[in-house]
Image (cartoon, grey):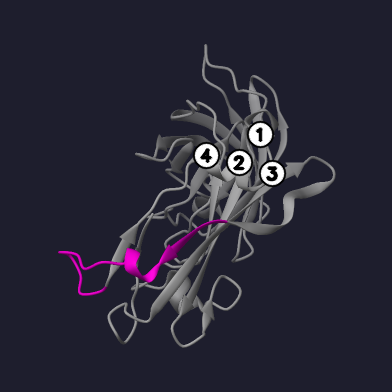
Amino acid sequence: MTLEAVDNEDGATVQTVEVRVRHRRLIPGVGLEFTPANDVLVTTLQASDFQPNADSRFLRTSFEVSASAAISAVGLTPADIEGGDVFEFRLVLNDKFGRRFSSDNVTTNVAGAPFYASPFQYPVSVICPSDLAGTYQFDQIDTFCGRTVSGSITWTAVANTPGAYTLSDGTFGAWSVCYTGTPWGNGNVRINDACNVLSMSGTDRFGDSYSMTVISSTPQVLTLEWENTYGEFGTVEVKSNAGKPWPNFR
């Protein structure tokens, strides 16, 4: 990760940045399990690590935490790790005035506004090889407006993001039947495959975010429920292509 320190001294108020981590696993029927319960320190960046650069007047530093370092920090071994697990990295910025900034006191303007992208917390998934790019036929058997729709949808692999696929229509055609022909438009909704654990992320052109739940999965049909923060939802049956059955999704 590359960090840029933006403050009224062009980055010179930074004292240290703690890089902390914990392990997360979703236990079906139980919920999330964290190891340890609270994140632990994996490394600390010093003020001297932040240096001038050619692209900005603000001081920057780059750092990397290896998988082995993260696993060791949380008290596990490589044999304990499973596909679909998540390592939650959290940054804690301490400045020379004694102030502390992290994910528990960051504002939305800093976390993800047009000029900043510093949520201070970064999930990193344990991924497996994924090959889901393609165009699929679907039947949406329920929508927020009570209508049904059938059609095709394209999943496009996201460059440099294994297991992530942008959707040509994040509503699986629901907008076109519920709003008299309104097209999907230029949304950025994704399906994410973390070792056959599927999730949805991203937003549509109005800024509403999306999530999903896998209802059932067979080699022929993936049934999922999607919803967004505007209150729209649907149940979709996505059919696999010939010669390429669906994995056992969760």
| Dot placed on the residue nearer the N-terminal end, 4 or 3 | 4
Q: Are marks 4 and 1 in contact (CB under 8 Å)?
A: no
Q: Are marks 2 and 1 in contact (CB under 8 Å)?
A: yes
Residue drawn 19% across the image and 65% down it? 53
Query: Taking 42 as reference, is 222 left or right?
Result: right
Q: Which residues are magenta?
A: 42-58
| Dot placed on the residue nearer the N-terminal end, 4 or 1 | 4
Instruction: Say which residue label 1 marks.
Output: 77
Q: What residue type is disc 2 on?
A: Ile
Which secondary structure lies at badge 1?
loop
Q: What residue type is disc 3 on?
A: Gly
Label 2, label 3: how far apart the Cα atoms are: 7 Å
| Dot placed on the residue nearer the N-terminal end, 2 or 1 | 2
Instruction: Give the number of marks.
Output: 4
Instruction: Say which residue label 2 marks.
Output: 71
Q: Is residue 178 above or below residue 136?
A: below
Q: What residue type is disc 4 on?
A: Ala
Depth check: give the residue in front, 245 or 49.
Answer: 49
Depth check: give the residue in front, 181 or 245.
Answer: 245
Query: Taking 53 as reference, is 199 left or right?
Result: right
Residue drawn 48% across the image and 42% down it? 66
Q: Residues within 10 Å of mark 1 (few under 14, many from 20)?
A: few
* Residue 67: mark: 4
Label 4, label 2: how far apart the Cα atoms are: 6 Å
Picture coordinates of residue 9, whole percent (x, y):
29, 85
Instruction: Say which residue label 3 marks.
Output: 75
Q: Are marks 1 and 3 in contact (CB under 8 Å)?
A: no
Label 4, label 1: how far apart the Cα atoms are: 10 Å
